[in-house]
Amino acid sequence: MKISELPRIELANLLHRGELLLKLPPFVTRLKTNVPSLIRDFAVMYADFEVSSIDAFADFHVEIASEPGLWRWLKPQVRFFFDGRPSFIPLPTVQAFAMLEWGLNWCVAAHSHQYLIIHAAVLEKNGKAAILPAPPGSGKSTLCAGLVMRGWRLLSDELALYDMTTGEIFGMSRPINLKNRSIGIIKQFAPDAVLTDSVPDTTKGTVALLRPPTQSAVRVREPVRASWIVLPKYTPNMLPLLEPHSKARTFMLIAEQSFNYDIHGENGFEAVGNLVDQCACYQYTYSQLDDAVRTFEELCSGKIT
Amino acid sequence: MTPHRDLIVNALLTPEIVRELSAQKWDLLIRQGRRTNLLARLANVLTQQGLLENVPIATRHHLTSAVLVAERQSIALRWEVECIRRALAYAGIKPILLKGAAYVMAGLEAARGRTFSDVDIIVPKKLLGETESALMIHGWQGSHHDKYDQRYYRRWMHEIPPMRHVKRGTTIDVHHTILPETARLTVNPAALLAAIVPVKDFADLYVLQPTDMLLHSATHLFHEGDFESSLRDLFDLDCLFRQFSALPDFSETLALRAATLGLSRPLYYAVRYTTLILDTPVPEVVRSEASLGKPSALISWVMDICYLNALRPVHSSTNSFSAWLARFALYIRSHWIRMPFPLLAYHLGRKAFIRPKSYDIEKSVADADLKA
């Protein structure tokens, strides 16, 4: 059953009781919350995601709860609990959904060492996939959102889960985290995009989350093999430029952007080596999403090699 | 008195039960294992018994992940110990490793699947100053810069404030004895430091001899007021008993050694609760001789109630009023036995009413670095 098929009142009840098991393939997360705004955002953002039966195994038990006490009338805050233990500092209640997303990223990155976990966006079209690894500020999420709104399948905006034995990459197809100016850019670029309200003054500035397209959520179980690694570099007023990026530098970038490269030791080294070997590696400087869509289309159709 | 046996303890003691676990039981087992830092140990036990292959795949990933983290930590710990060894070798100081670092370097079973938060070493009190400066020269930085905290550590405690390496972010605790100087039990550190054994393949690295290693582990656990990792520590004791009991003379000398060091009481508790909670096969001679350290009937009855509750996994699934009360009582006790009452009253009053001055020491040190 999908989240969207649950009556809102039942969804709220399940979340209140902590009995909602959300399938985030390859994981299952058990969620609990009493925060009304979070329930509302969750229902919209995860509408196309499946629910698991109550007696299934859950990888992560997550709760977002309103902070009790008199302060809640003046300065309402929420706190993230991982399996009953408070984690991270409390945040203003308006940031509840963003907090859920950041918390889920942490759950996966801190515990799932069956994968090499790379901080990167992953997109697929016509069976071919691109990895967009990037340090913050490079415009990765904006580019990812732009391509997804033009028919690319979203695997992930933040976490690429690389299976080191099969070479397959999984994403969870979760909402895309847009920051600051990119919120307006995406709204303009894709007026039909579904976003949460913009939340100002977070640690990352103003954020809004973009709902993944239904097709991406439906195909969440299908992994990809990467064909390209593209390092995006947003530079205002620049003409688009796709240029080869050396394999050695790309290797270092992937290793740096991996959360658990150190834990995998030699296997991690081999895995990153194999991944970089199998991919064409580029750096892409851009300032306009329309240019980017065109470039990636050319990449996909084999016009660029 | 029979303890309530929680799922994680059950699975570690009788691993066959995992064949029959439902998805929901697995869910609980993984959570309890993760919270008690016993997941990697569970994975190792299941591997030894040939049971890991039967574990459902989603669940198995959590076990194998925990093993990967533990193995990585073991490598990192060896490197950290090597850095410490080198730093102190320049000053001619030969550190004695304690707890986790000692288990790893001595190649003990207790180290398998264990995770670490810091490295503990002990040096003779007269070398404390030299040790501290040698570590500072090699990049470790002191903490707790508040004047009161400094006095608290240096005058009353058994260690100096934890030191953190500026680049690696690793922490080292430098001890000069194993209990606070103000504690009710008086330990004989000279006797402890006179009987150390070298780590295999190292000329300037030592660990406590087996009896003392076990006694220190017991002393640490049964003076502790924080129970986050106490079940793991009890399993450490279980491992040490099992492995050391095979050594010649270990069992025969343990109780006597405890008496010499002034640690008969912690030994009694160690024997009592490992056998009661973990069915640890403690040799008969140790069991009978350890009872010399048994407190009065009333106290041992109260302690049984407290420890059987407090040593349960600290996890939402085991939350109960009795566990809370037991941990609270033992927390009070840990302070009570840490220092005499007037000093304790002063210390708690001071902590309650006087806020430490907050000045950004990290920053000032960084500035100093730039100028240098």
Image: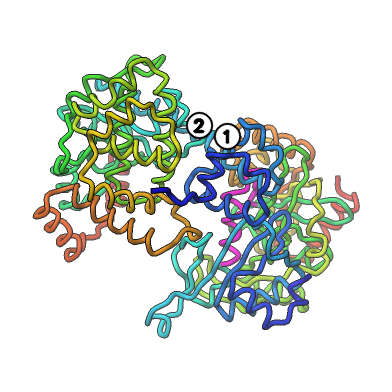
Instruction: Say which residue appears at 58% left-offset and 34% top-offset.
Output: B44
- Tags 2 and 1 touching, CB below 8 Å: yes
Disc 2/disc 1 C-alpha distance (Å)? 8 Å
- Amino acid carrying mark 2 in the image: Arg
Which residues are the magenta region? A100-119
Could you say where residue B276 lies in the image, as x and y percent from the top left? 40, 41
Could you say where residue B270 lies in the image, as x and y percent from the top left? 33, 37
Work out whether disc 2 and disc 1 sit on a shared chain.
Answer: yes
Q: Name the disc covering residue B112, or none.
A: 2
Q: Left or right: B190 with respect to B308? A: left
A102 in the magenta segment:
yes
Tell me the crowding category of disc 2: few under 14, some 14 to 19, or many 20 or more residues within 10 angstroms, Cα based. some
Image quadrant assignment for residue A35: bottom right
- Amino acid carrying mark 1 in the image: Asn
Q: Left or right: A195 with respect to A265? A: right
Could you say where residue B175 lies in the image, as x and y percent from the top left? 24, 35
Magenta stretch secondary structure, dominant: helix
A277 in the magenta segment:
no
Image quadrant assignment for residue B52: top right
Q: Write down the chain letter for disc 2.
A: B
Tag 2, which secondary structure?
A: loop
Instruction: Say which residue appears at 39% left-offset and 17% top-offset.
Output: B247
Q: Write down the chain letter for disc 1.
A: B
Looking at marks 2 and 1 on the same chain, the residue that comes earlier in the sequence is marked by 1
Tag 1, which secondary structure?
A: helix
Tell me the crowding category of disc 1: few under 14, some 14 to 19, or many 20 or more residues within 10 angstroms, Cα based. many
> Which of the two residues, B206 or B139, is positioned nearer the viewer here?
B206
Q: Name the disc covering residue B44, or none.
A: 1
Instruction: Say which residue appears at 78% left-offset and 70% top-offset.
Output: A1
How many numbered badges does the structure rendering display?
2
